[in-house]
Amino acid sequence: MKTQVISIEPTSTTLGFNVVVLIGKEQHEFTLNVETATIADHQIQGIRGDEYFLNLFRFNQNLGVEIYKLVSQMREGNSLSFPLEIGEFYAEELELASK
């Protein structure tokens, strides 16, 4: 099924983003947060999805990575034109994720 990112909007916290994705005709919403860790005296930022996101994309991590990239672009202040097609999500993967 065609997968599109419909919107990425900042949350009320400065480090969060609400993401809406359309998989086929089914809409999914989740939150991704920017997290900071200190490694060897250097701060590293990463993006982590909520439990729903992690469960939904555990069998199609390539699409999850594409969403992470788009959130990162938004975090950097880039403007994106939605909807953005990011690939295919197969029915079998969606069925496994719903279990």
Image (cartoon, rainbow, N blue to C red):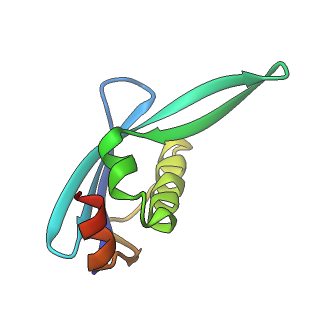
Q: Is residue 32 above or below residue 22?
A: above
**Picture quadrant where residue 52 is located:** top left
The location of residue 27, given as percent across then percent down, is: 17, 61
User: In the depicted view, which residue is nearer to us: 48 or 75?
Assistant: 48
User: In the depicted view, which residue is nearer to us: 56 or 75?
Assistant: 56
Residue at 40% across / 33% down in the picture? 16
Q: Is residue 41 above or below residue 82?
A: above
Which of the image's four quarters has the N terminus?
bottom left
Q: Is residue 21 left or right of residue 79?
A: left
Residue 22 visible in this rendered orientation of the protein: yes
**Picture quadrant where residue 25 is located:** bottom left
Residue at 26% across / 78% down in the picture? 91
Q: Is residue 36 above or below residue 53?
A: above
**Picture quadrant where residue 97 is located:** bottom left
Q: Is residue 58 left or right of residue 51?
A: right
Q: How many marks?
A: 0
Q: Is residue 19 left or right of residue 87?
A: left
The location of residue 61, given as percent across then percent down, is: 49, 62
The location of residue 11, given as percent across then percent down, is: 31, 32
Which of the image's four quarters has the C terminus?
bottom left
Q: Is residue 45 left or right of residue 89?
A: right
